[in-house]
Image (cartoon, rainbow, N blue to C red):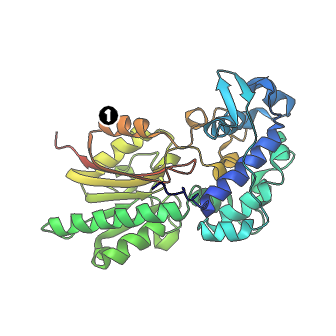
Amino acid sequence: MAHPRVARRPSATDRLDLISLAAAAAALRLEPGAVRSVGDTARNLGAVPRHEWLVPRWLGALARHGVVELDGDTYRVRGEVPGVGAADLDELHVQARIPDEVARLHRRALIYLPELLRDDVTAAGLLAPESTVRGALAGEGLSVLTQQLDESCADLVALAARTRRHQLRVVELGCGTGRMTAAVLRESPGLTELYRFTDLAGQPLGAEALDVNTDFAAQGFADATADVVVAGHTLHHAANIGRALARIRNLLVPGGELLFTTLVEDDPVALTSTHFLHSSERGGAVARGGVIFPAVPAWRNALHAAGFALKVELSVGARSSARHHLFHAVRETV
């Protein structure tokens, strides 16, 4: 006997995705059936040079939802974003565990997307005075999906601690919001003594300052002094992920382990809020051509080139437009 299929109720993250995509579609002035040029669209909207890169990113996200069909610089509008009410936006942010500073920027940015593209309004201006650019970037892409991978990462760190004969030396890169830290130390509270918390400015949790874009040893992190390096949603901020991974490899002992989480596809919430913060102030090139969250193959290739062997990969969020990924890699001995 055939049973009727029960439709899955959209999660809070799903609904936030659709609300964000609908706002982007409205800002792009999409009309069903229209055939347009990506470049012409950016110019017609009055997008300033430093924000032009966002237009193709928005269209790419809309293409993955079947709203538009892309063909090089040309796209055809196939339909509309499925309707989702935005009246309960605040509650959705809470349910999805979006950090407060990101939620605040997202809520305000959705109202001003055309003005943000033209620089009539700035994302930094929308954050002030309650929030900071650094705080918003620290929380970019974080959600309840991230928490699932943080807990998996904590389990893997605990396993590493049990298999070592000496106390595990852990370095955390970019402790930021502290979500990864909390998960790891909740599972392995005995690691605290040899746990080095680091961040760009060295402020959260009394962390030491460490910039992944410059030499680690020169910053007081000597080669082969860590058994495990963890990075919760941090490494996508590196100017060059290959060089950052090479520095991490040098920090680890042979056989040392790297565990990091990251978004691996465009996140509609970030696309319509924090991504504006990645635009160059002077209109220069955006990192990686606007690919803020590199795809899985790019990370795999970079890990291999830096001298790592992949052990474990986990992914969550496959039903939403953004996927969160956990990579667990080991420094090769030669």
For this view, does 283 lie left or right of residue 326?
right
**Dot 1: element:** helix
Q: Is residue 223 visible?
A: no
- Which residue is more in the foreground, 209 or 7? 7
Residue at 78% of width from left, 54% of height from top? Answer: 110
Residue 200 coordinates in the image, percent (x, y)? 51, 57
Image quadrant containing the C terminus:
top left
Give the quarter of the image for residue 242: top left
Where, by quadrant of the figure, is residue 181 drawn? bottom left
Q: Would residue 310 be found to the left or right of residue 204 on screen?
A: left
**Residue shown at the point (26%, 54%) measured from the top left:** 257
Residue 139 picture location, percent across and down = 58, 61
Q: Which residue is mark 1?
A: 305
Q: Is residue 67 above or below residue 183?
A: above
Judged left or right of residue 333, residue 192 is right
Mark 1 burial class by Cα count in 10 Å: few <14, some 14-19, many 20+:
some
Residue at the extreme left of the image, as rendered: 165
Q: Quadrant of residue 186?
A: bottom left
Residue 66 visible somewhere in the drawing: yes
Quarter in which the N terminus is drawn: bottom left
Residue 156, percent across and down? 29, 63
**Three-letter code for the amino acid on which mark 1 is drawn:** Ala
Residue toward you, 171 or 181:
181
Q: Nearer the viewer, residue 321 or 307?
A: 321
* Number of numbered tags placed on the structure image: 1
Compare residues 22 and 116 and report the one nearer the observer.
Answer: 22
